[in-house]
Image: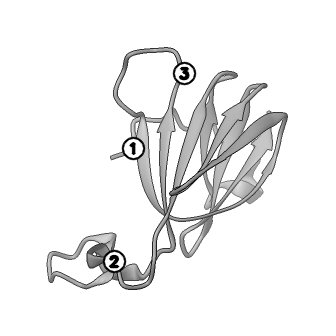
Amino acid sequence: MNHLAPVPDTDPMDADVDRYLLPQHAHLVVYEREAGDAADRDDGTGSDAGTGASQLVTVYDCGAAQKPPSAQLLGELGSVRAACETTENPTGYVVSMREPSVLVDEGDGHYVVRAR
């Protein structure tokens, strides 16, 4: 599920890179998965469940809004290069964005967040 707005292609060199707009108050909830999780086993459906992704990243437009998530991604959130506040919890961590930013899919399930 991904309902994030794509970044308009302005640089032809980045045409093959998936980039999505994140609002200023976006929250990224990162759940650290263990290697033995049931979701890591290939169930034959062709989904990403068999990729062995170490994290489930859930993106919310705003932490205060009572809305469902805008996206859920399997992979790894590598780094956040934008103003944010990170809070750890027992199952992972939450990244609360403090400025508009861009979520970049670097391939192979690796994601980074950059300032706009």
Q: Is residue 49 above or below residue 6?
A: below
Residue 50 sits in quarter = bottom left
Residue type pointed to by label 2:
Asp
Q: Residue at x 84, y 34 (%)?
A: 83
Amino acid of disc 3: Cys
Crowd class of label 3 (few under 14; some 14 to 19; many from 20; radius 10 Å): some
Q: Residue at x 54, y 70 (%)?
A: 109
76, 11: nearer the viewer: 76
Residue lying furthest left: 44
* Mark toward the start of the polypeptide (1 vs 2): 1
Q: Which dot marks residue 113?
A: none
Q: Position of residue 36 (x, y in %)?
A: 36, 85
Q: CA distance from mark 1 to mark 2?
A: 23 Å
| Residue 80 image point, x, y percent | 77, 50
Instruction: Specify the quadrant that holds the C terminus.
Output: top right
Q: Is 22 left or right of 10, judged from the image as shown?
A: left
Q: Nearer the viewer, mark 2 or mark 3?
A: 2
Find residue 2 and name its label.
1
In the image shown, does 87 or 76 lie closer to the viewer?
87
Circles 2, 3 touching at the beta carbon (< 8 Å): no
Amino acid under label 1? Asn
Identify the mark at residue 62; answer none if there is no mark: 3
Q: What residue does disc 2 label?
A: 37
Q: Residues within 10 Å of mark 2 (few under 14, many from 20)?
A: few
- Residue 7, placed above or below residue 30: above
| Secondary structure state at the residue bearing disc 1 | loop
In front of the other: 17 or 30: 30
Q: What's the residue at 78%, 45% (across, down)? A: 114
Give the number of the mark in front: 1 or 2: 2
